[in-house]
């Protein structure tokens, strides 16, 4: 029993390194990529892109925090990623409304007329 | 006792499970809301990393504004009975990601013992310093910064806003246009979205006539 408690205590005291954050953002990136590649609905594809952008943002902030970024470059570029994501969502959803008006749906199959 | 590790694992569990549910859910509305939950948890990670301004911004924009707009577009374009395809079992996905994460952690954990990636404490960035870095350039405010990129980002946001208005506006129509066509289209269908009847021509003709 004491051994288990010791293990738990050692785990809690082990600290969080930059590698933990890098592993987490790698997993987020893979999840977003999976969403982009498997979803048929365009709105769901856009959600996958947002997960990718957030993974990149987490990487910027984590590496900036752990490397002692005195000029705050990492956080500044994370701010730019936020504004980029907002602009991307606004334009993307406007395009989806246009696709819906002309095709009657917002799936990738609705946009396949160049294939035939 | 240091609680950073425990909090980190709890928050990353929330981030990953919400993100996995968001890419595997068969209901688009649930996917959008769980994406908001995932981004909210990422905001918590930003607070852990000593970036409170970015954490607040993440909660306001990525977990607040973007899901609201996405939910509006889902309501406008999706029929209520539509179920998405999900060609992978969600539990299988969770198990696979857990396995991958465990292997990644085990890979890195051998290299992280007493190396200089182990940082004792992270100092909190003040919003004032971040704003000064954002709004200064080589000849402006006395220190180097990203003023030009800030201006470019603001122009990008302006262009995106105008572009969204122009893209959603139909020809020969004022902004306060007719709204009946969309609800005509959005009849519930039985089988999925692909079987939705091709309504655009009829709806367009009805709209013209």
Image (cartoon, rainbow, N blue to C red):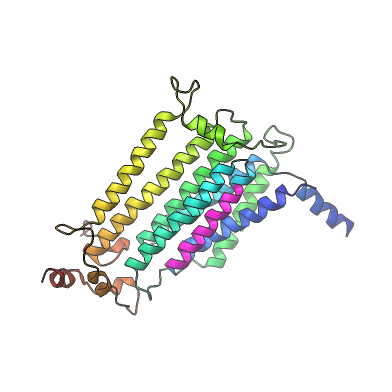
- Of A102 and A1, the residue lying toward us: A102
Lateral position of residue A72 relative to residue A33, left or right: right
Question: Residue B196 lies in what quarter of the image?
Answer: bottom left
Percent coordinates x, y for residue A111 in the rendering: 26, 59
Q: Main secondary structure of the magenta part?
A: helix
- Give the quadrant of the N terminus of chain A: bottom right
- Residue occupying the point 40% across, 72% down: B83
Q: Is residue B110 above or below residue B166?
A: above
Residue A78 in sight from this viewpoint: yes
Lateral position of residue B153 relative to residue B121, left or right: left
Q: Is residue B34 magenta?
A: yes
Question: Residue B99 lies in what quarter of the image?
Answer: bottom right
- Residue occupying the point 63% across, 54% down: B11
- Give the quadrant of the C terminus of chain A: bottom left
- Residue occupying the point 45% across, 42% down: A81
Q: Is residue B69 above or below residue B87?
A: above
Q: Is residue A79 magenta?
A: no
Question: Residue A115 lies in what quarter of the image?
Answer: bottom left
Marks counted in the figure total: 0
Q: Is residue B185 above or below residue B42?
A: below
Residues shaded magenta: B28-45
Residue B86 in sight from this viewpoint: no
Percent coordinates x, y for residue B24 in the rendering: 48, 64
- Residue occupying the point 29% across, 51% down: B164
Percent coordinates x, y for residue B61 in the rendering: 47, 51
- Of A36 and B143, the residue lying toward us: B143
């Amino acid at each position: 029993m004491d051994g288990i408690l010791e293990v738990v205590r050692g785990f809690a005291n082990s600290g969080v390194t930059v590698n933990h954050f890098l592993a987490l953002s790698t997993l987020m990136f893979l999840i977003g990529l999976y969403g982009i590649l498997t979803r048929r609905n365009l709105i769901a594809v856009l959600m996958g892109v947002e997960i990718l952008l957030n993974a990149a943002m987490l990487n910027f902030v984590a590496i900036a925090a752990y490397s002692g970024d005195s000029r705050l470059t990492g956080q500044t570029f994370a701010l730019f990623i936020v504004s980029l994501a907002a602009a991307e969502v606004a334009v993307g959803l406007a395009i989806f409304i246009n696709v819906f008006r002309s095709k009657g749906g917002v799936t990738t199959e609705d946009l396949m007329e160049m294939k035939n | 006792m240091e609680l950073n590790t425990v909090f980190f694992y709890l928050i990353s569990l929330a981030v990953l499970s919400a993100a996995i549910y968001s890419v595997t859910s068969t209901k688009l509305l649930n996917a959008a809301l769980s994406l908001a939950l995932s981004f909210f948890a990422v905001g918590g990670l930003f607070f852990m990393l000593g970036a409170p301004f970015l954490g607040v911004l993440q909660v306001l924009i990525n977990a607040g504004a973007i899901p609201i707009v996405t939910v509006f577009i889902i309501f406008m374009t999706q029929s209520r009975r539509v179920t998405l395809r999900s060609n992978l079992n969600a539990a299988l996905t969770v198990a696979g990601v857990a396995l991958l994460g465990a292997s990644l952690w085990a890979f890195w954990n051998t290299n992280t013992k007493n190396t200089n990636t182990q940082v004792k404490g992270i100092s909190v960035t003040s919003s004032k310093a971040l704003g000064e870095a954002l709004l200064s350039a080589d000849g402006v405010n006395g220190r180097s910064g990203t003023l030009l990129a800030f201006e470019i980002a603001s122009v990008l946001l302006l262009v995106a806003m105008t572009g969204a208005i122009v893209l959603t506006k139909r020809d020969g129509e004022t902004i306060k246009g007719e709204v009946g066509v969309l609800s005509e289209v959005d009849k519930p269908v039985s089988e999925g979205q692909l079987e939705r009847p091709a309504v655009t021509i009829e709806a367009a003709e009805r709209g013209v006539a």
